[in-house]
Amino acid sequence: MSESVITSVEQLVENASLTSIEVFKLSAERKLDTPMDIGGIEIDPVYKLDADCRSDGQGFRIRFTTEIATPFGDINCGVYAEYSNPGFFFGPQSSVAVTEFVNNVAIMHMLPYVRQNIADVTLRVYQAPLLVPLVQRGQLAFEIEISGLKNASGS
């Protein structure tokens, strides 16, 4: 099969396979002089996202980080999803497709892992789980700079 440039989200969905979702960062720090009462606390998570191609040119990774500041301490969680897309690569014309894929597919793959890991680490550190608010598809939106993605040819 000859290599083709990804030009539409449908093409990306059809040809990209999720190969793994893993946590690359997880921490919770507790302020010892602050009384613990997580019940009813409102949080405002800060989400960040970036993407790059695998070095073998046969796929890409999306890294999604969540940072939460609370009166009790700070929580950080980083999850990445790795996709394979052999025979296809990214070019400048792939930006719209990759952005749509990230915002409507990849984030929905990663959010359950973020929520679970934050609940787990806060249960251990704060003695109660902190539940990250549910995010509906389309509620978070990121622009992906395709220039940071390199295709199998290195362009």
Image (cartoon, helix red, strand yellow):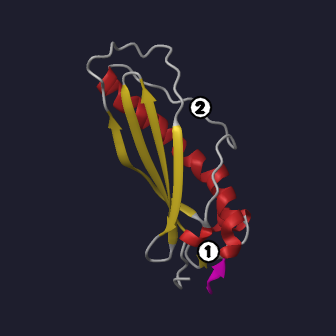
Q: Residue at x 47, y 46 (%)?
A: 65
Res. 44 image quadrant: top right
Tell me, for residue 90, which label it has, or none: 1
Asked if residue 4 is among those painted magenta in the image, a careful observer would answer: yes
Given residues 126 and 5, the one toward you in this image is 126
Vertical placement of residue 16 versus 71, above or below: below
User: Are dots 2 and 1 in contact, CB under 8 Å?
Assistant: no
- Dot 1, crowdedness within 10 Å: few (<14), some or many (≥20)? many
Q: Residue at x 48, y 35 (%)?
A: 115
Q: Which residues are magenta?
A: 1-5
Given residues 18 and 119, the one toward you in this image is 119
Secondary structure of the residue carrying numbered label 1: loop
Q: Residue at x 47, y 41 (%)?
A: 66
- Dot 2, crowdedness within 10 Å: few (<14), some or many (≥20)? few
- Residue designated by label 2: 134
Vertical placement of residue 144 versus 78, above or below: below
Q: Residue furthest left?
A: 32
Lower sequence index among marks 2 and 1: 1
Q: Quadrant of the C terminus?
A: bottom right
Q: CA distance from mark 2 to mark 1?
A: 31 Å
Residue type highlighted by circle 2 = Leu
- Relative image position of residue 143 (x, y in whole percent): 64, 56
